[in-house]
Amino acid sequence: MTVSQAEKAEAPGKKMGDLGTRVLSALVLAPVVLAAVWFGGWFFTALLLVACVAMAWELAGLLFGEASVRTSWFLTLTGIASVLLAGMGLPSAALAAGGAGLAFSLAARSWTRRPLWPALVAYLYLVTPLVALIWLRADESLGLAVLVWLLVTVWAIDTFAYFSGRFIGGPKLAPRISPKKTWAGLLGGMAGAVVVAIGTWYWLGEGSVLALILIAIVLTVLEQAGDFAESALKRRAGVKDSGALIPGHGGILDRVDGLVAVAIGAALLALVNNAANPAAGVLIWP
């Protein structure tokens, strides 16, 4: 599709307006998120419960189409049950609840001869990252540190990628999926993540700075992959945004798409390195 001359003429002003709205939304939401992360416990769980309901509704709209209203309630209830169980310190039970909800949905869709993959994506996308975040935050030693690091890393990737892509431009990463993403943006995002990793290592005063830098680079790739995955879902559904909950950003999935992938990646790192103390398993490497 070609862009009309009128659209081209007003594009710069529109971009600046969108940027201002995005910044204002971030200034309002960031303190709420950081406060919940700081206090942890049920404060953090309550924040994720709100996010869970919004995410479930948007996922149902993207993946289930006309049946979204009828199917979103079960996805929502499954997500709520999983978050509550994780908040009670039962991450294995939380994942089991998510698995039970997924199995029921797969069985129902199989019975009515509907595609199975939308349910698989919806339940894994909703339950896994939320349980992972609660599990990581529950680590008494470094739970706060790892959550702050993950959030700041994602914010740094998005910010550095946005400005690098805008002012440097260059070849596109995957124009058919996300036409605005560039290789310059990816490299800029990596630079932002590396800066945060070095600052975090200096703050902690232990572990390997090289390992943390390598992890930051991997998380950048995951963050961008999460962005692409959500963009692909939106293109399939024929929508620009997953919702209209957050001014300047769209829906909650538009805001947390990268964090979803990063949270899952961090949880896998913790399982490999130190499952008994998952936050240390992410941040502290020999």
Image (cartoon, rainbow, N blue to C red):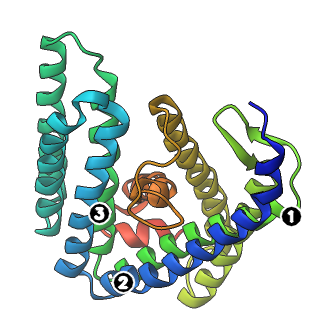
Q: Amino acid at mark 2?
A: Val
Marks 3 and 2, how far apart in space?
Answer: 12 Å
Snapshot quadrant of residue 86:
bottom left
Number of the label disc, if any, that sits on residue 32? 2
Residue nearer the viewer, 192 or 197: 192
Please give the residue where the numbered disc 3 appears in the rendered image: 51
Q: Nearer the viewer, residue 31 or 194?
A: 31
| Residue 283 placement, left or right of 142 | right
Kind of residue at badge 1: Phe
Q: Position of residue 208 (x, y in %)?
A: 62, 73
Q: Position of residue 231 (x, y in %)?
A: 54, 41
Residue in the foreground of this view, choosing between 104 and 8: 8
Q: Is residue 142 left or right of residue 254?
A: left
**Amino acid type at mark 3:** Ala
Q: Which mark is residue 182?
A: none
- Dot placed on the residue nearer the N-terminal end, 1 or 2: 2
The crowding category of the residue bearing disc 3, from other C-alpha atoms within 10 Å (few below 14, some 14 to 19, many at least 20), is some
Foreground pick, 210 / 186: 186
